[in-house]
């Protein structure tokens, strides 16, 4: 047994090759095929027993990733050797093979490295000296059939020596797989010849090309995986900071210096001893997680999804701590390891750069303009800030910040070896936290009008950011265990700062016209940038992060050089950074008390403008697909209405004027008098609906005339949804029936606005998406939604039966335990009782809630649907049947209890109503 598997204890308990070979030798069958099948069955049992033993050991010692991965490769080696011997001696014996009938079996890829997760592909190659003979074809074919019968996923190739050389030269993927090639069984002299030819004819004088190809491949892989190592459901193998990045470092080291083990990277001068320890620690942890992941999924799986994160955290014995659950602690550690992989990659690239890159061009780094040779004592090395000597930071620790400020100011890069030194010396900046010069340099970077996102990310990668602002250090690599946030807290924050800078430069004017238009009116941009930096700074501390974060802002503001007024503003913004989105997405903006309450909390136009911008960048930085046109419209409506109140009527368009302007716009679009249409609709309708929806509604109502029931579904690209409009005689239960019918047709309601005309007709507008968050745009789908609603409202279809027959999909939200909550507020509106329901999002939730309200004999005047990943927040403005608020205590308790049952899917709501 090679030293490769010395780390695997008691190997015979995993598989006993001698005993297994004796079992196969005793097999008898009437023909070759049945003998092969009988052998494959025995081998499959040994495979399953070996996997079970490896899984048991991993459960006993959950952090031994290297041991588990090596055990998997050891098991496969033994099974292949037994299968080879059985195939060549019992199935296709050849006592005196000719020179052409030699074969060698090699392991390639990860298996060749001696690492296999439980359900990894078995990557093998058969090499023959020349063109295959009939005997070698029989052996190869028989072995492959046996492996498939064992249930293995096999990546295989059969090549002659010449084919191996030719294909390896032409394809970098094949070359990389063969680089890891390892002898398993067969003709040893043929293997030696193959290894010699690969080194002499493929590797020789091609290191530069190979490195460039692997780095291009790596960059493309990162792009496909989201471009950040801080996505909250990372791909542990292919994602940024994952195993493949470590493999890439090893491949390059092996290609350049012929290293056989990662430890030899130290001897080659590519890593220090400390960095090698970090390499091994990260590699071991990632392998442990990958092996747990395969075991839980019972298949090859590399995406660390929410539903397995909790189980792996428990398997690896992470424990809850105040303010941070075990799964958040596990993922925090995961991201720290991913960050370590990134740091090591940077150091590695620096060595490659020095050794292989041509002057003025570097691997993995873009070209930039020439710069002076020296800058504030730093040396300029081909456009990168380098150190004149190793103790340069120790001489003056403020230089740890200055290097990043200079990089931003002059558009330079920081040399990877400088980053290595900054990481090593980062703790020295702790003694300079109150130094005015240090804080001024930090604020220069934070509020830069160039590219603060990139430079802050460099500062974070080096560990300087967290040392200088220890409150920020506490959220580095910290995930939030929910489906709403796509990134860790530090990555989300840095992205938010970058978005703010981008909006300020006018680069997002099309997406954010309002925010882009008001930024130059903001009096203190420094306070705004600090608020964006600190808005989530207290996440994971066990309390309300907005309140705790405001206290941190009050402490840090003076240190950063903010005035008392700026500090107060920044702290207020942090304290209320969720206020605007909560109001816009959960409340009825046509109810004037909503606007008055919001304006009272905000108190000034300056705060309103800053809060809007902070809200926009906070939402956008959550992740792709979270921002949409509908949210932009709601925030704009709230901003306009609040600004009217705060400017005490000095705004150009007040509420009444905006309504008049909408009506004038409609009259112009329709080209006729609209007095009759205006007279039928309440003021709230004109406030709630945007111009384009009003025009659609008017044309629709004109088209259907006196019909008592009409439904129209049209694609609404500006909102990324389908607009479903229902025009029907108003009656009790109308809303829950529409909601149920939309769900039965496969739709997901993302917003609902309910209006009743003065002559008793309901005009209800629903924004609907498919289960993947896209609009319905197929004519057949649109027709199906229209027909489903019409049938449900006309009682032609039994809605209960249709909903019961529709299977509930398995939701990713099932991984989260959310206790439903119902909040009933009689103070939020002068006219309505406001009911807010928080629950885990699931199909037909809105239908169940609306049905509960119908049963409670209340009238729904508007509904507002908001989802935050797995969490749904549905708000209803209701009255009793006489149009009054609901005040009776017993009735409120009964209503709350029924809504809780509906939110939890309990009792009569366990099946669709």
Image (cartoon, rainbow, N blue to C red):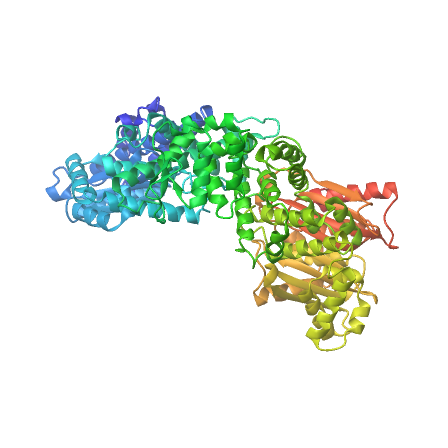
Task: Out of 801 and 73, give the one closest to the viewer.
Answer: 73
- The one nearer the camera, 220 or 159, is 220
**Horizontal arrangement in the rendering, residue 709 relative to residue 226 (left or right):** right
Dividing the picture into quadrants, the one containing residue 381 is: top left
Percent coordinates x, y for residue 215 in the rendering: 33, 45
Residue at the image position 24 percent from the left and 43 percent from the top: 207
Instruction: Count how many numbered circles sit on residues in the image.
Output: 0
**Relative to 872, does residue 188 appear above or below in the rendering?**
above
> In the drawing, does residue 1 fall left or right of residue 828?
left
Q: In the picture shown, does residue 75 fall above or below 665?
A: above
Asked if residue 459 lies left or right of residue 680, the reply is left
Front one among 822 and 530: 530
Q: Is residue 415 visible?
A: no
Residue at 61% in and 52% down: 519
Q: Residue furthest top?
A: 10
Horizontal and vertical percent for residue 261? 28, 30
Q: Is residue 46 visible?
A: yes
Note whether 251 is above or below 432 in the view shown: below
Q: Quadrant of residue 363?
A: top left
Q: Quadrant of the N terminus?
A: top left
Where residue 432 appears, as percent x and y from the top left, is 51, 28
Question: Vertically, is 610 above or below 48?
Answer: below
Q: From the viewer's perspective, is 473 left or right of 743?
A: left
Between 306 and 491, the one lying in front of the other is 491
Residue 70 percent location from the top left of the image: 34, 30
Which corner quadrant of the image does residue 8 belong to? top left
């Amino acid at each position: 047994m090679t030293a490769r598997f010395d780390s695997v204890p008691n190997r015979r308990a995993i598989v006993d090759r001698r005993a297994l070979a004796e079992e196969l030798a005793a097999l008898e069958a009437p023909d070759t095929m049945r003998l092969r099948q009988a052998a494959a069955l025995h081998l499959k049992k040994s495979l399953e027993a070996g996997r079970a033993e490896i899984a048991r050991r991993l459960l006993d010692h959950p952090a031994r990733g290297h041991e588990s991965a090596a055990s998997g490769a050891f098991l496969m080696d033994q099974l292949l050797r037994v299968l080879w011997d059985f195939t060549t001696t019992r199935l296709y014996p050849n006592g005196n093979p000719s020179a052409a009938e030699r074969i060698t079996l090699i392991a390639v890829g990860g298996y060749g490295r001696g690492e296999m997760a439980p359900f990894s592909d078995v990557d093998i190659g058969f090499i023959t000296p020349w063109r295959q003979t009939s005997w070698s074809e029989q052996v190869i074919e028989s072995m492959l059939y046996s492996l498939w019968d064992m249930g293995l996923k096999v990546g295989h190739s059969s090549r002659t020596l010449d084919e191996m050389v030719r294909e390896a030269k032409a394809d970098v993927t094949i070359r990389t797989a063969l680089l890891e090639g390892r002898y398993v069984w067969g003709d040893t002299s043929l293997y030696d010849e193959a290894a010699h030819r690969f080194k002499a004819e493929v590797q020789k004088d091609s290191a530069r090309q190979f490195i460039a190809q692997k780095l291009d491949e790596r960059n493309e892989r990162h792009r496909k995986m989201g471009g950040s190592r801080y996505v909250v459901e990372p791909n542990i193998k292919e994602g940024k900071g994952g195993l493949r990045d470590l493999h890439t470092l090893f491949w390059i080291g092996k290609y350049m210096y012929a290293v056989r083990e990662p430890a030899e990277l130290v001897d080659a001068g590519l890593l220090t001893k400390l960095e090698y320890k970090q390499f091994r620690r990260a590699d071991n942890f990632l392998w442990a997680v990958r092996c747990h992941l395969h075991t839980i999924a019972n298949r090859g799986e590399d995406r660390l999804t929410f539903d397995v994160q909790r189980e792996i955290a428990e398997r690896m014995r992470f424990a809850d701590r105040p303010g941070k659950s075990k799964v958040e602690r596990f993922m925090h550690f995961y991201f720290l390891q991913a960050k370590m992989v990134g740091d090591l990659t940077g150091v590695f690239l620096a060595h490659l750069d020095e050794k292989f890159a041509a002057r003025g061009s570097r691997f993995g780094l873009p070209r930039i303009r020439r710069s002076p040779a020296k800058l504030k004592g730093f040396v300029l090395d081909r456009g990168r800030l380098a150190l004149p000597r190793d103790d340069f930071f120790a001489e003056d620790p403020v230089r740890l910040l200055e290097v990043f400020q200079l990089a931003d100011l002059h558009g330079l890069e920081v040399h990877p070896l400088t980053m290595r030194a900054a990481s090593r010396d980062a703790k020295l900046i702790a003694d300079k936290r109150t130094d005015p010069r240090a804080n001024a340099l930090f604020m220069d970077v934070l509020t830069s009008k160039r590219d603060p996102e990139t430079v802050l990310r460099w500062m974070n990668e080096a560990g300087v950011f967290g040392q200088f602002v220890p409150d920020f250090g506490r959220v580095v690599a910290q995930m939030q265990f929910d489906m709403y946030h796509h990134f860790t807290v530090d990555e989300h924050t840095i992205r938010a700062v970058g978005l703010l800078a981008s909006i300020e430069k006018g680069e997002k004017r099309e997406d954010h016209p309002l925010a882009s238009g008001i930024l130059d009116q903001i009096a203190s941009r420094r306070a705004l940038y600090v608020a964006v930096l600190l808005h989530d700074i207290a996440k994971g501390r066990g309390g309300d992060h907005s309140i705790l974060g405001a206290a941190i802002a009050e402490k840090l503001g003076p240190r950063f050089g903010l005035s008392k007024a700026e500090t107060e503003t920044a702290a207020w913004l942090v304290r209320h950074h969720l206020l605007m989105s909560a109001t816009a997405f959960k409340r009825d903006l046509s109810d004037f008390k909503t606007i008055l309450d919001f304006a009272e909390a905000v108190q000034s136009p300056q705060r309103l403008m800053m809060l809007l911008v902070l809200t926009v960048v906070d939402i956008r930085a959550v992740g792709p697909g979270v921002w949409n046109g509908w949210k932009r419209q709601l925030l704009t409506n709230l901003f306009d209405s609040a600004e009217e109140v705060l400017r005490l009527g000095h705004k150009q368009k007040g509420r009444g004027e905006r309504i008049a302007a909408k009506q004038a716009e409609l009259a112009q679009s329709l080209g006729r008098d609209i007095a009759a249409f205006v007279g039928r609709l309440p003021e709230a309708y004109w406030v709630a609906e945007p111009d384009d929806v009003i025009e659609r509604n008017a044309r629709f109502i004109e088209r259907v005339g006196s019909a008592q029931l009409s439904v129209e579904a049209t694609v609404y690209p500006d909102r990324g949804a389908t607009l479903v409009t229902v025009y029907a005689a108003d009656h009790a239960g109308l809303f829950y029936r529409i909601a149920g019918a939309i769900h039965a047709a496969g739709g997901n309601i993302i917003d609902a606005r309910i209006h009743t005309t003065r002559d008793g007709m309901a005009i209800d507008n629903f924004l609907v998406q498919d289960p993947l968050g896209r609009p319905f745009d197929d004519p057949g789908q649109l027709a199906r939604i229209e027909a489903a609603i019409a049938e449900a409202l006309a009682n032609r279809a039994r809605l209960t039966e249709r909903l019961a027959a529709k299977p509930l999909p398995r939701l990713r939200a099932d991984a989260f335990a959310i206790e439903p909550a119902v909040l009933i507020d009689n103070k939020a509106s002068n006219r309505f009782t406001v009911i807010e329901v928080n629950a885990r999002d699931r199909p037909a939730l809105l239908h169940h809630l609306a049905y509960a309200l119908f049963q409670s004999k209340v009238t729904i005047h508007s509904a507002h649907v908001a989802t935050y990943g797995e969490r749904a927040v549905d708000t209803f403005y209701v009255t009793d049947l006489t149009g009054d608020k609901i005040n009776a205590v017993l009735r409120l308790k009964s209503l709350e209890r029924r809504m809780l049952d509906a939110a939890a899917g309990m009792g009569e709501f366990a099946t669709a109503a």
